[in-house]
Amino acid sequence: MAIFEKTIRNQNFDTLLRKLEHAIPDSSWSAELEAGSDFKEGSAQCSVRVFERYSMVGGNRLSLTLTLFQNGDAPIRLSAIAAGGSQAVFFKMNTLGEDAFLEDVKQLLEEILRANMFYSGFDALFSILFPLVFLFVLGMILFTVVGNLRTWSKNNASPRLTVPATVVAKRTNVSRHHTDNTMSHTFTTYYATFQVESGDRMELRLSGTEYGQLAEGDTGELSFQGTRYLGFERN
């Protein structure tokens, strides 16, 4: 007879039991779940599973009794007992089959716990990163909105000016946005750079229609308010 006991923390009782029920029969071509029993009393619960598999060493079938017990939120108590593996009448010839069965179960348990630890760590990391990313995106949105409101307010407070100017450059900025159904939407922003008599240059944003009416080298009267384009009248 071979016995293995372990105290398991931070694991879900039902999930661990379900994984062991599938992993142990899958570990050997002859392993099977033979019987099971479950009972609860208040916050305590206990599950017993009996598995069997053929032993090449003993020439017969081995049994393994797996017991899980948990009281409320306390750690899970696991007990695994392997028996059989010998055809002797009065004493055991060997316990190699029992030990091998138990070692397989211990290895399966460690693999399950490592996998659960990995996913638990990933969930913990995600629970930390998601709020940070959300706050970062929200901060960027608020920063953009505040910046636009500040520019709008500053432009409203600026005087309306009309000065001689020359169109010295034009450019566009194209951005693409994809929706959930993989459709793409394109947005184009239009800019023109004007040079005034002092030699200073300013780039102003304008509509597509106004952009199309301008050509590099055009001279005329530029009307603007802060960074807001109001119009351009050619000479």
Image (spheres, rainbow, N blue to C red):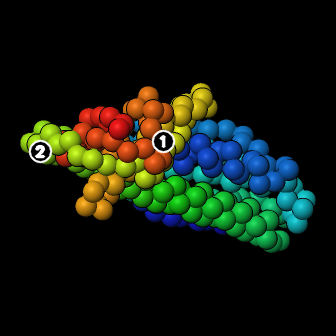
Query: Which residue is labeled 1 in the image?
Result: 215
The image position of residue 135, as x and y in percent, is: 29, 50
Tag 2's secondary structure? loop
Q: CA distance from mark 2 to mark 1?
A: 27 Å
Query: Looking at the picture, how far across and down is residue 88, in whole percent?
Result: 85, 64
Q: Position of residue 155 (x, y in %)?
A: 16, 42
**Residue at image location 81% in from the left, 61% down from the top:** 85
Residue with the most extreme front position: 235
**Which amino acid is tagged 2?**
Ser
Q: Quadrant of the C terminus?
A: top left
Is disc 2 in contact with disc 1, using a CB cutoff of under 8 Å?
no
Judge the density around disc 1: few (<14), some (14-19), many (≥20) Cα neighbours within 10 Å.
Answer: some
Q: How many marks?
A: 2
| Horizontal side of residue 56 vs 204, given as left or right | right
Give the label, 2 or 1, closer to the camera.
Answer: 1
For the point 26% across and 35% down, which residue is it?
Answer: 230
Residue 158 x/y as whole percent: 11, 44
**In percent of the image, x 79 and y 71: which residue is there?**
96
Q: Residue at x 63, y 49 (%)?
A: 20
Query: Disc 1 on helix, strand or loop?
Result: loop
Work out whether residue 4 or residue 75 is closer to the camera in this orientation and state it.
75
Q: Which residue is mark 2?
A: 158
| Vertical comparison of 119 with 2: above or below | above
First of labels 2, 1 by sequence position:
2
Image quarter (top left, top right, bottom left or bottom right) of the N terminus: bottom right
